[in-house]
Amino acid sequence: MRFEEAPTEVYEILRECKDQHFPTLAGCNIKVVFDLKKRMSGGKLTLGSLQKPNELLRFFTIDESGNDEGYDYLMRIDKKAWTEIMTSDDKKRLVRHELRHSDVDFDSSNPYKLRGHSVEDFYSEITLNEDDPRWGERVSMATFSAYEIERNG
């Protein structure tokens, strides 16, 4: 199996980030899973992603999500990066970054949408990461190296 349930620690960080930075996501149901395989996009390692579940997946997650419509978002996190490379600050940065991809429009029948980056990151994240502006690059390189070491034995 490629995915596994994210542990309580991830949901605690998710709740903290929502409370501090994303009040519009207060009622939003987000499922978080660990991705057990290296995922590349555009030649770069993907540490995490936020996606909208399709209608079928929403249906299958109704019971687990605790509401009539299933999960509003799915967050995927690279397990190796999270468990072997990231500091606690990096973990908060990653979750916060992925939540920046959410876009809420309560006037819509489907209020939870996605948005892309404003720049390579998000403008608001640049200020929040002044102490370590290249944290993502640092973590990606270390995680990629860990995958290569594992592959080469």
Image (spheres, rainbow, N blue to C red):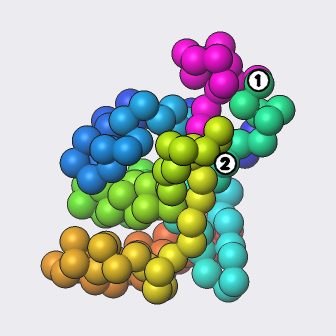
What is the x, y in percent for residue 92?
30, 56
Inspect the magenta stretch and tell me whether residue 62 lies in it. yes
Examine the image and state in which quarter residue 142 appears. bottom left
What is the x, y in percent for residue 94?
40, 61
The tag earlier along the polypeptide, 1 or 2, is 2
Residue at coordinates 78% horizontally, 42% vertically from top-left? Answer: 54
| Distance in Å between CA atoms under marks 1 and 2 | 14 Å
What is the x, y in percent for residue 128?
22, 71
Helix, strand or loop at mark 2: loop
Q: Is residue 132 left or right of residue 15?
A: left
Examine the image and state in which quarter residue 72 appears. top right
Q: Is residue 97 visible?
A: yes
Residue at coordinates 58% horizontally, 17% vertically from top-left? Answer: 67
Q: Is residue 33 visible?
A: no
Residue pushed farthest right? Answer: 56
Sort mark 2 into few (<14), some (14-19) or many (20+) by Cα contacts within 10 Å: some
- Looking at the picture, tell me which residue is in the foreground, 48 or 7: 48
Helix, strand or loop at mark 1: helix
Is 127 drawn above or below residue 38 in the view shown?
below
Residue at coordinates 66% horizontally, 48% vertically from top-left? Answer: 52
- Report the residue marked by disc 1: 60
- Report the residue marked by disc 2: 52
Do the residues bearing badges 1 and 2 touch, measured as CB atoms within 8 Å?
no
Q: Nearer the viewer, mark 1 or mark 2?
A: 2
Query: Which residue type carries mark 2?
Result: Lys
Inspect the magenta stretch and tell me whether residue 111 lies in it. no
- Magenta residues? 60-78
Q: Is residue 82 left or right of residue 144?
A: left
